[in-house]
Amino acid sequence: MEASVLGAGLQHSLPHTLSLSSPYISSAYPFTVRAKSLQTSCAAAPVKEPPPTGVKVNVQKRHSKSYLARQSAIVEVQRSSDLGSALSRLGGILKAQDLNAILRYFGMLKRWNDLSQLFEWMQQNGKISASSYSSYIKFMGKSLNPVKALEIYNSIQDESAKRNVFICNSVLTSLVWSGKFDSSIKMFHQMKKDGLAPDVVTYSTLFAGCIKDKHGYPKALELVEELQHNGLSMDSVIYGTIIAICASNNKWEEAERYFNQMKVEGLSPNVFHYSSLLNAYSIGGDYKKADNLVQEMKSAGLLPNKVILTTLLKVYVRGGLFEKSKELLTELEAMGFAEKEMPYCLLMDGLAKAGHIDEAKSVFDEMKKKSIMSDGYSYSIMISGFCRNGLLEEARQLAKDFEETYDRYDLVTLNTMLCAYCRAGEMESVMGMLKKMDELAISPDYNTFHILVKYFCKEKLYLLAYRTMEDMHNKGHQVDEGICSYLIFNLGQIRACAEAFSVYNMLRYSKRTMCKALHEKILHILIAGRLFKDAYVVVKDNGKFISKPAIRKFAAAFMKFGNINSINDVLKVIHGFGCKIGQDLFQKAITRYIMKPEKKELLLQLLHWMPSHGYVVDSSTRNLMLKNSHLFGRHLIPEMLSKHHVMLVSSKSRMRKDE
């Protein structure tokens, strides 16, 4: 029974931050409130164990002395400042379900140390149940400690308990809460492999993970199909999550379909469902559908709240209805829903992107005049708007104002200010921003690196741009093909050939598309820098994209300066790409071998390979070899040339027969 109660709570125990496309609108707000209220109700009082089936319950004994003593002990343990001492004194009279209630109480208050201490005491004293494991694992995930949650799960000795669907669901919840969606999917597959049948709670938890995952939409569709195949029904919570997933992936038609399907199945939409679908409409600025949806919501007896009206504002802005947006913003102000900067930011951003920078600045000034609470995002919008409209001095000045006004930063704001300083060519300010990021321990993201590489290239600081791109690659960010090509060319111009090849490899091993012409460009750079080993790799792997004149240029340089041990391999590779090898290349190769008599085996291998592929040693090269035959053994070269002649005649004879 206790596990069943916990399962009901887990069904709605979704992550706290299920944000959609806008970082300021969380359509998952009703989910979070509902989850918290359900969890609070679970922790508010100890869960009573039901009597065995068929046993009559004497109601008069419900408030016996032992029961009252246990209730008093629960409260005392919860309030104790010395948990170990309280458990020593009172643990003996407490049952597993009482301790589980305390466990959930500590979890809800985020008293993680007390939570772990209590759980360890329960394990040591044998007062533990499946619900204990389930609750503890779930709260470990909530504390963003999925490793501990998995350790506890793996430490369960009882296989039947380990394969308890409620405990497995708790592990899934822990992983999802901690952002380990891939791990939760692996756990899900392991559950099925172990013979466990996923329930609605399982799927609900996984859907919650899908909403935050980059590739969550296709995975959510697979889960919907599987859920229905298993004969399970989607409840209103799952429908709400699916609609939110569709909205965050710009799939408004799919969101609308699920919304209507839910109503057909007799489930009544709540504010969360309406706000999620409204958010889907905001992607394309479909204000007509949005207005109809809000009207339908009102007809259903639901009053638009702050989230609904703010999302509607976003729809109007995306649809270009700026006058209507301003009217709605005035309504939000009158209702007390515009005490923070978010609705103003939505309008400013829309105006700035539409080229109405003066109107955007007017909204910004009005917001400052009204002393609206701001986290600095409004500054980011205006700085970006100024840069976009070529007002670099205004962008630079506003960035300076932000630095003087605020002592808090986030990555979005820092990137925006960095971009403004880069566009204005303020190197000192750029370096100041980078120093500030280090001081605040804020890790750069893809945008940070992209801004810096472009700026350093613009300033002709190509080696600095290279080091920045190298750092970007090492931190797992994909590089941009256009910037890579530009940087490779300019590194080649300053003879930084090794660095150019490194950038080439960053792009080659990334998942980005690569211009075919770049292979030939890097080949010329490597030849100029005499990096023949690297040049050989480029030709060997991408010769089909390189012109024959460029390949011949590489081969000629390699015969003269390349590693003598790779000469035969190079000749075979260029022959394989359809480049006819001239006598000049063979003469250069053989000359290299004559200069290194200890490489006679390579010379013999080359002479053996040539006639079988239609090549012959010309008279001048033959005379050169005979003149130096004493270096290889006086009879070895003449014998080899004789065999070479026989093989050549035989090869020509076969060719005539084939004709």
Image (tube, grey):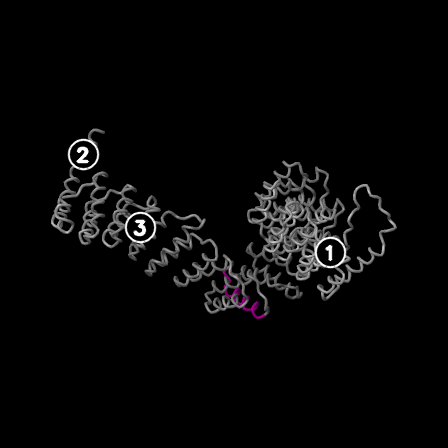
- Label 1 sits on what residue type? Leu
Q: Residue at x 39, y 62 (%)?
A: 463
Asked if residue 497 lies left or right of residue 483, the reply is left
Q: Earlier in the sequence, mark 2 or mark 1?
A: 1
Q: Is residue 519 visible?
A: yes
**Front-most of residues 380 and 503:** 503
Position of residue 37 measured from the top left corner of the image (x, y, whole percent): 73, 53
Asked which secondary structure carries label 3, the reply is: helix
Label 3 and label 1: CA atoms lie apart by 70 Å
In the picture, the disc for residue 444 is none
Question: Majority secondary structure of the magenta segment?
Answer: helix
**In the rendered structure, which segment of residues is drawn in magenta?**
390-404
In the picture, the disc for residue 99 is 1
Q: Is residue 457 visible?
A: no
Q: Earlier in the sequence, mark 3 or mark 1?
A: 1
**Front-most of residues 270 and 355:** 270
In the picture, the disc for residue 536 is 3
The residue at the far right in this view is 60
